[in-house]
Amino acid sequence: MTSPYSQALPPLTDLPAPRELPREATHLVPPAEIIADSKSALRRRLLRISWAPGLLLLGLWYVLLVLYVVGASPTFWFLTLLVSLGEPAMLRATTAQLGLTGGGLWAAFFLLPLFATVVSLAVTALAPSAIAGMDPRRHLSERGFQADVATRITAFLLGPSVLAVAALPLSVAVGLPQPWSGLGAGQLMAWTLAVGALLLAWILVRRTVSAPTVLGIEPAAALETTGRLDRDPVTRRAAAAQVLGQDRRHLPPNPGTAAARRALTPRGALTSLALITRASLTWVAPAAAGLGVIIFGIADVVITFNGLLQSDLVQVRSALHWQMVAVGVPVLALVALAMAFAPGLAVLAAAGQRSAVIDQRTYPSWEHRKRVNPWESLVVALTGWFSAALALLGLVLFAVVLALLGAATALAWVWIVVGGLTLIPLLGAGASAAMRRGLRDVLYGPAGDYMRRETPYSLVAPDIGTRAQRAEDPAVRAEQRRRLQAQGGDHALAIFDLDASGERLWVDDSAPGAKDTAVRQAELAAGTLPDFGGEGSPFTRGDGSGDGQHGADGRHGADGQGGRHGIPDSMTGLRER
């Protein structure tokens, strides 16, 4: 309940443009802020948990193999299985008629899925390199960071299967010898089923390689609970700050700034297209796969029963004519290009709503943002409408050109009608959903360019070596010392511990050429090494004799110390020099 003494805040408008933060060097991140010990440790961790995604991948490859074999003519295979219950020879005859052999099928079912699963797991060895350089602070939320980690690993696991499904129609088009002699209705039904299997496998595999499982960090849901319900105020505030950072990218952007016109630039257009495409995988792809199974399945049944009176029941009539592909690909490219600029057009069309904005800040709830920022709400809605309109224009153009060429079949008209009634509205809804989450990415760029979320980690894994080896890196220790000094206050004990962790803080004797005079002179010229007046020093003649006066015992100066370079009495004094 709102306090009776509370007062309404003034409208938060005319905010200054957000300041872009410089990107920190990942090789200077201290070991305490690194999640994993090394890339090798991540690979070993992925290997230990690979049994769960491995079983899912094995099942996926079996499903794809079955669809490939049955997809040659699904209805014909079903009728053959029914007939073979009374006449087993019919199954062998159908297998031979489709160009398959019993031994080849047994070998394929025993070896091919297992081999493909091993290849998929082997490719995952490259995943640590894809996530090692991620900075959790540059992600707006902990949930978003953990989702990004899981998505990158899943992409490596499912990469081979996605490539196999995508390459199958191309292999048929170029005429490679295989059971699929064409892209008939049965083959296309099996292919759409394979796409649906990939979508389902993506969801299941992604759950088995979640960031808490791979990195050993606290789940985002647990952090959210801690940030709301923990009894300790300090712990609660720290968890809430780690759950969600403050997005500095306010909307609408200030007039005259680069963000105000970024949506119409090539970079903004590519970002828009990537966001809409990614949203389409959630909104459009499942519906398209389901419709494909239904439409192509019905068509395969009709074609098969119409061919029962023909001599060759397995003759494949292609459902895709070359004219459809020749017309559809350019039209699809034009629609994608136009949709990339849909958010930019929406920004221009919503200029009149700028004065109606009462709060430019970013809120996690879309309902809140829509209420206080009518400009953003209108841009999101117009992007969906523009995208749907552009897709509809492309569909009409495709239908007109096919009709003029005389290449439009009954199956093509069914897809044109169904696509216009179902898929295009879903595409518009997906484009709006993409802009609800990513409009600021289109206009400003990533959130990490303007903010740093409060999190105990700054890096997933070192790019080279381990955390222990990074702790011995002189540059990393120097960066830690600089941070302590920049924080202010009394950090003398911490600096002493840092200095005392190794006497030769600036030089690693195990490094190649570390004791070489030429290397030390080069480092000294760069201003990174203190000079002790020893051998090879520019303060001496190269042999340690120097220019000072020598006593009878051979020491420098009258008091036994060189007049040019005193020796500090502590590591802290050495640093101060």
Image (cartoon, rainbow, N blue to C red):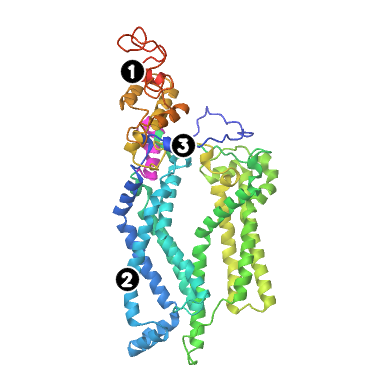
Q: CA distance from mark 2 to mark 1?
A: 68 Å
* Residue 208 drawn above or below residue 182: above
How far across and how far down the image is residue 509, in percent? Answer: 33, 32
Do we see residue 294 in this rendering?
Answer: yes
Q: Nearer the viewer, residue 11 or 33?
A: 33
Q: Residues within 10 Å of mark 3 (few under 14, many from 20)?
A: few
- Mark 1 to mark 3: distance in Å? 30 Å
Going from N to C along the chain, the mark reached first, 1 or 3, is 3
Residue 120 x/y as whole percent: 37, 61
* Circle 1 residues within 10 Å: few <14, some 14–19, many ≥20: few
The magenta region covers: 217-237
Q: Amino acid at mark 1?
A: Ser
Quarter of the image with the C terminus is top left
Q: Which residue is mark 2?
A: 111
SS at circle 3: loop
In the image, 368 versus 296, the foreground residue is: 296
Task: Give whichever of 393, 404 is nearer the camera.
Answer: 404
Give, as a three-letter code, the residue at label 2.
Leu
The residue type indicated by label 3 comes to Ala
- Helix, strand or loop at label 1? It is loop
- Residue 25's tag is 3
In the visual, does 405 lie left or right of 309? right
Q: Quick one: SS at disc 2? A: helix
Asked if the stretch drawn in magenta spans residue 221, the answer is yes
Could you say which disc has been placed on residue 570 in the image?
A: 1
- At label 2, counting other C-alpha atoms closer than 10 Å, the crowd grade (few under 14, some 14-19, many 20 or more) is few
